[in-house]
Amino acid sequence: MAQLVIKSRREFIKVAALAAGSTALAACGGAPAAAPTAVPPTKAPAAPAATAAPAATAVPATKAPAPTAVPPTAAPAATKAPVPAAAAKPAEVLGAKFIGKLEGYEIQVNAAKPAKLAEAPMLAELVKAGKLPPVEQRVPDEPCVTKPLTEVGKYGGTWRRGFTGASDGENGNRMVSVDKWIFWDYSGTKVMPSLAKGWKVSDDGKTTTITLRKGLKWSDGKPYTADDCMFWFEDLYSNKDLVPTPDKALAPGGKPGKMVKKDDLTIEFQFENPYWLFELVLAGDMLPGRGQATGQFQSYYYGGYAPKHYLSQFLPKYKPQAELDAAAKAANYTDWKARLRVLKDWERNPELPGVQPWKVVAGSDITKPVWLVERNPYYWEVDTAGNQLPYIDKIQWTLGENVEVINLRAIAGEFDQQERHLQVANLPVFIENQQKGNYTVHIDPGANGGDANIYFNFSYSEDPEIAKWIRNKDFRRALSLGTDREQIKEAFFLGLGTAGSPIPDPVMPEYPGDEWRTKWHTLDLAQANSLLDKIGLDKKDADGYRLRTDGKGRLRIDIDCTSSFVAYPKVAEMIVPQWKKIGIQLDIKNLERATMEQNRNANKQHLMMWSNGGTELIYLYPIHALPVQENSQVGPEIAKWYATGGAQGMAPTDPDLKKCIELYDQAQTKKLDERNKIAQEIWKTYVDAVLAIGTVGLSPAFLGLRVTSNKLGNIPGRHVNAQHMRTPTSSRPTTIFFKS
């Protein structure tokens, strides 16, 4: 079995002390359903007490693996892992003492099925009533055995969280992201089995074999086999009506790969070119490896597998299209495709069979003000004492009409654990109310370099004058030099994080070097004004603002913002007077997130403010750096051009952006060390050309402020905060429990 590991003591120490990564959302694209009525932020329901303790003894606390356990001459497939890490721990900054010890669960690779199994009381009652088979028949013959962080937990309870509506699907996805074939250990540095029993990469790098767990079942009790994987590849992913443009992550070197069934428990991905990166593509957050929940929610048809026995009935291959269209229209859908888009989404269709730890309760999907999921009786993970996981029976999300309401409820102790939508600017209030709210504050910094990046839309074309300046390197440099990052850091990040360019943390293997943190990313008004004068923007109006070169008055640049993980509109408001000093008028468009994303997808944005979470491992999540995935804010029409091989969209015209895309493509078939060197070159080019303006990064702004009820057990002092770890899945929610 291939496993990625860290190989040096230096890397191990840094991971143990600092590991954390980015977060961010991107997969939340797609038009949301009509917003349900928000539940008033009044008294939240009390968290139900745990109902029963599994029959087991406590296990010792998980210890970090000794660095000497991994020999430097590991097997070929056991390559050096990307090492997530966070900013240097500030000694004097508010909140620094809440950065705890990195710790977590442990997957017992190749562990045998425990001789004795136990189950939650709510399931035992169904077994007694004859509505479910015994747990011995529900848990697979080869389950995933997980050692909890501290102790074997107790069954029962409802985990309370907050969400912002139907477009907040990642809120649920990130709680169930273990539904991937392979995932990571708690440190985020070693790839481990998850839904699959194991995998193997061939010596030439052209074939990756996935071995499924024997006895695996869907949530309705039907067998999960290689046929479900082939159904996904042949009938969903390869269906031009559903996926018009194949994903380039399945076409290394421009040559599409294929999936082949070897037997009921084995599939192969076969490629014409060596594809050493593919192991990480499956473990990370690229489209093919996302698993069912994230891979098939909203408009997506990825993930690697799907329940053939259920979804095939909605496809023209298996039933006449006229019949499907008629049924779709009767259910108020335009056609069979529109209906399927909802039916294959776990958050919207309670009848959809899944393999996640929890499944949606009928009548309480994501479009409702209260969104409820309950345990999957056929879930495939057990603890070391044989207790079928998860420990917690249900998760309940309560709608907040905006982010401010969610923060207020969290401060009041109305959530059992919440990290999504909590804003670092509120940290003093969270700290002050810990005892009153009976919760503990945790800070989990990220390793991505930009938590409030200013992105340029390189495919913008509606106003030729604006488009011209977006593509002008010295114009972008001037805007960056006119930005006071230290002021932003103190005002909105409370001193947590690092001011500078968007490059990742220094301990990341793709880090280009210290000089690239500040290049073109320090405040220098004189140089900024000089650059703008030299490129022809030397004429100003009576108020000191620079004039357009086409004679149409003042040059005005729009920036799209939304108040989400960071109060981006307020950050932009601080930049407005900063840029006035260099004669640039910045106009803020404060939008709902869905509207901002619609503007992005329609290619209407000049600038957009967002995080670059995930780019600390740029090959695993490039969308926030390069337009190589659909709907990238770096240039949605360029992303379309890239995805279609030039058949649609707009080719990049900026030479530096074009170079970065070419380097990214070159890296796909290379081994790790060479990929890292190419990534460093990408970042050097990126920063020198200011393809995006960094402000503050390496902070806890995205999912890094975690508030946890003191009633919960197996809570890590710190967990990895990273896109590839699907935070908060990095805490292994299945092993968290109510102590009382």
Image: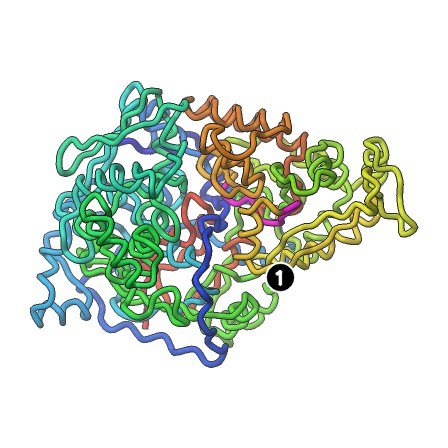
Q: In the depicted view, which residue is nearer to us: 388 or 465?
A: 465
Q: Residue furthest bottom?
A: 43
Percent x, y of residue 112: 15, 45
For mark 1, give the secondary structure. Answer: helix
Q: Amino acid at mark 1?
A: Ala
| 530 horizontally vs 183: left or right | right
Crowding near the residue tagged with mark 1, few <14, some 14–19, many ≥20 C-alpha atoms within 10 Å: some
The image quadrant that residue 248 belongs to is: top left
Residue at coordinates 13% horizontally, 47% vertically from top-left?
215
Whether 497 is drawn above or below 528: the answer is below
Answer left or right for 696 relative to 624: right
Question: Which of the two residues, 258 or 76, is positioned nearer the viewer here?
Answer: 258
| Residue 714 found in image quarter | bottom left
Residue 184 seen: no
For label 1, the residue is 425
Q: Is residue 623 magenta?
A: no
Q: Nearer the viewer, residue 257 or 331?
A: 331
- The quadrant of the image that shows the C terminus is bottom left
- In the image, the segment drawn in magenta is 605-614
